[in-house]
């Protein structure tokens, strides 16, 4: 079987520049799960409920022991506090992270909607994209959104 390649428009970038893109992607993947947790916790609290381990597990579609491990990690990182027989609460650092994550999510979702993506698909896709988009790209998204408003 003959190997067919798609021709590149540009040559490969310098190795250091090329590796930076992969490094940023790995870093974004590591932070994505943490951001998802703090964003969900603030959403549950803002919805008038406590952010309980059982609710977090149900919303993320994972087992409660998985949530327990992550909550221990978030507590060790200073992002959440827990009270016995109560829900989970965000620290000031956790609230800051959640607000930044929510703002990125909303920007990406609005951008996708400007492109004609359905609301449901835009919400789902934004959940993954928000963690990987640079500040420069977010600024470009915001400019396009503003131009269309």
Image (tube, rainbow, N blue to C red):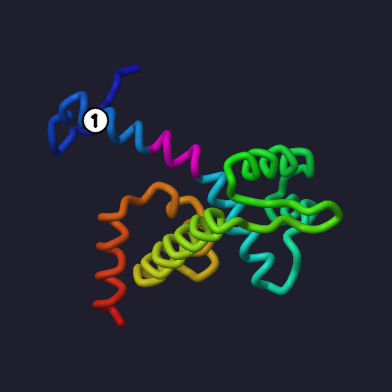
Q: Nearer the viewer, residue 44 or 148?
A: 44
- Magenta span includes 28: yes
What residue range appears in magenta?
25-31
Q: Quadrant of residue 47?
A: bottom right
Q: Residue furthest bottom?
A: 149
Q: Residue at x 32, y 50 (%)?
A: 134
Q: Position of residue 66 (x, y in %)?
A: 73, 39
Q: Position of residue 81 (x, y in %)?
A: 68, 52
Q: Residue at x 73, y 60 (%)?
A: 51
Q: Nearer the viewer, residue 130 or 102?
A: 102
The residue that label 1 is drawn on is 18
User: From the image, which quarter does the C terminus lie in?
Assistant: bottom left
Q: Nearer the viewer, residue 143 or 98?
A: 98
Q: Position of residue 56 (x, y in %)?
A: 72, 54
Q: Residue furthest right?
A: 85
User: From the image, which quarter does the N terminus lie in?
Assistant: top left
Residue neighbourhood size for the residue with mark 1, other residues' Cα within 10 Å, grouped as few (<14), some (14–19), many (≥20): few
The answer to whether residue 143 is left or right of residue 105 is left
Q: Residue at x 44, y 65 (%)?
A: 103
- State the SS at label 1: helix
Q: Residue furthest top?
A: 1
Judge whether 8 appears above or below 104 on screen.
above
Number of numbered tags placed on the structure image: 1
Judge whether 42 appears above or below 61 on screen.
below
Q: Main secondary structure of the magenta part?
A: helix
Judge whether 36 appears above or below 18 on screen.
below
Q: Nearer the viewer, residue 147 or 24?
A: 24
Q: Position of residue 15 (x, y in %)?
A: 20, 24
- Magenta span includes 108: no
Q: Residue at x 83, y 52 (%)?
A: 84
The answer to whether residue 61 is left or right of residue 20 is right
């Amino acid at each position: 079987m003959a190997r067919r390649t798609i021709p590149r428009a540009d040559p490969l970038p310098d190795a250091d520049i090329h590796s930076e893109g992969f490094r940023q992607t790995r870093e974004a993947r590591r932070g994505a799960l943490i951001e998802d947790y703090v964003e969900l916790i603030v959403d549950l609290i803002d919805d008038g409920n406590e952010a309980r381990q059982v609710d977090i597990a149900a919303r993320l579609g994972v087992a409660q022991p998985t949530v327990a491990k992550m909550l221990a990690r978030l507590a060790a990182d200073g992002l959440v506090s827990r009270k016995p027989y109560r829900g989970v609460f965000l620290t000031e650092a956790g609230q800051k992270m959640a607000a930044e994550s929510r703002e990125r999510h909303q920007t990406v979702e609005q951008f996708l909607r400007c492109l004609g993506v359905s609301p449901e698909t835009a919400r789902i896709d934004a959940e993954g994209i928000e963690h990987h988009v640079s500040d420069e790209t977010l600024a470009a998204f915001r400019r396009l959104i503003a131009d269309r408003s």
